[in-house]
Image (tube, rainbow, N blue to C red):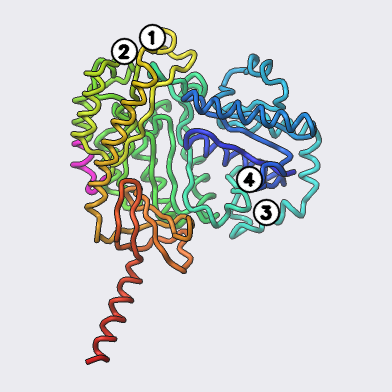
Amino acid sequence: MHYYIWTLGCQMNTADSQLLASELEKHGHHATENWEDADIWVINTCVVRQSAEDKAYGRLYQLHALKQRDPSRIIGLMGCLVGVRDPLRLRQKLPFVDVFMPPSDPRPLLTFLADRGAEAEALAADAVARAHRDALQDEDDIASGDLVLPVHERNSLVSAHVPVVYGCSFACTYCIIPFRRGVERSRPVGEIVAHVRSLARQGVREITLLGQIVDRYGKDIPDGPDLSDLLHIVHDVAEEEGVARIRFLTSHPNWMTDRLLDTVAALPRVMPHIEVPNQAGDDEVLARMKRGYTAEDYRRLIARIRERIPGVAIHTDIIVGFPGETEAQFQRTYDLLAELRLDKAHIAKYSPRPGTVSARRMIDDVPPEEKERRRKALDDLQSQIVAEINARSLGATVPVLFEDRHRDKWRGRTPQNKLVFVESDRDLRGRVEDVQITWTGPWSMQGRLLSDVLATASGDTITLAVTR
């Protein structure tokens, strides 16, 4: 059978979709690039903001119309819209959906396929399954239980996500994640290592460790390893398996220790790229959000990060229009962003999520047009800041890990996760190459391979010599 997965939302959902695809591939099912050709449709949902939830429902009702014409098609719903509790109300609201899957759990779909006999049909296609295994570099490299990439991604996917912490037990008042993904649970080290090895042996060159609060890894395990310990272990695996780069996200200011920062600075394959949300620059707003730190605490953290990690890029998240946020409080957020000059800011308008503390106990009193004005003000400020930061790289040479082609150019990223485009006839996928930056903008940069620059310079020298 053929499957198609739509993934909405965060990197954790991307990893969950990859896990689901892996399980389907292990049992002989195939991905299709055209969703209309699929026998199995899965929507992996996000409910962090209303717009993401609306997209999921829009796609569901579109599929419902197609399923009415062909009832044999299977519709699966996965992710935060389903949540970790029995989705009885969702089942009643969406009776045409065949399977409901909690976040990170593909088992309900596999069970459904087995009950329909589709599993037996897939397993009977032994030649197909064997062909999938043979597509790997070595059939013995991917042991039972390891993640097997879809055939079209093996030895072509450059960057992949590896969840290390599921769920969250630190409930910010605006956040729905603890209610939908459950309590915080750290994955065993051995399981993470097996995941990293399996991806590396299928051509992945960059690993990003994921958690709702990734620097709380191991906090739920008595005397267990912390994120610093895990980074050392994964770094050793990366050296053995040829993984060039390691990243991690998303961090929380309360648990970003100096030991973790020193680990990032010390390990050459861990990139100088930190994502640590700020959310607001006013202490009263931060307290209503239940963030557990002040604006001054955040300032000191940014100073420590920059002191301990040379050349670091820092990303943040900000919410505008939180209940009760006054113009003066917003201005403090604006001023803090202007002062800190961070490398990237994900800016979102507050969206009340049913069941959260802010939705139950606070009034969403900032008008939509004012939220948009504040969002745009921060976005314009950040565009100017990033343009100035990136302009410093003009003429510099930076190592770039290339991921794929985009509009006839190779697309890759620097250690600081900045986007770079290069023209080249060579196959650069998965390669780390030195690039001389020739143009910079707020969202990307362009450059030339240093090897091409040197070759041109050498050719010019020879030409001059002949002319003389």
Callout 3–callout 2 Cβ contact below 8 Å = no
Residue visible at 75% across and 31% down in the picture: 67
Q: Amino acid at mark 4?
A: Ser
Judge the density around disc 1: few (<14), some (14-19), many (≥20) Cα neighbours within 10 Å.
Answer: few
Callout 3–callout 1 Cβ contact below 8 Å = no
Callout 4–callout 2 Cβ contact below 8 Å = no
Dot 2 corresponds to which residue?
Answer: 324
**Is residue 147 one of those drawn in magenta?**
no
Mark 4 and mark 2 lie on one chain; the one further toward the N terminus is: 4
Dot 1 corresponds to which residue?
Answer: 363
Visible residue check, residue 188: no
Q: Amino acid at mark 1?
A: Ile
Tell us which disc is closer to us: 3 or 1: 1
Dot 3 corresponds to which residue?
Answer: 132
Q: Is residue 452 above or below residue 461?
A: above
Mark 3 and mark 2 lie on one chain; the one further toward the N terminus is: 3
Q: On the picture, is 404 further left or further right than 30?
A: left
Q: Amino acid at mark 3?
A: His
Circle 1 SS class: loop
Callout 2–callout 1 Cβ contact below 8 Å = yes
Circle 4 SS class: loop
Which residue range is magenta in the image? Answer: 303-312
Dot 4 corresponds to which residue?
Answer: 144
In space, the residues marked 4 and 1 are separated at their CA atoms by: 51 Å
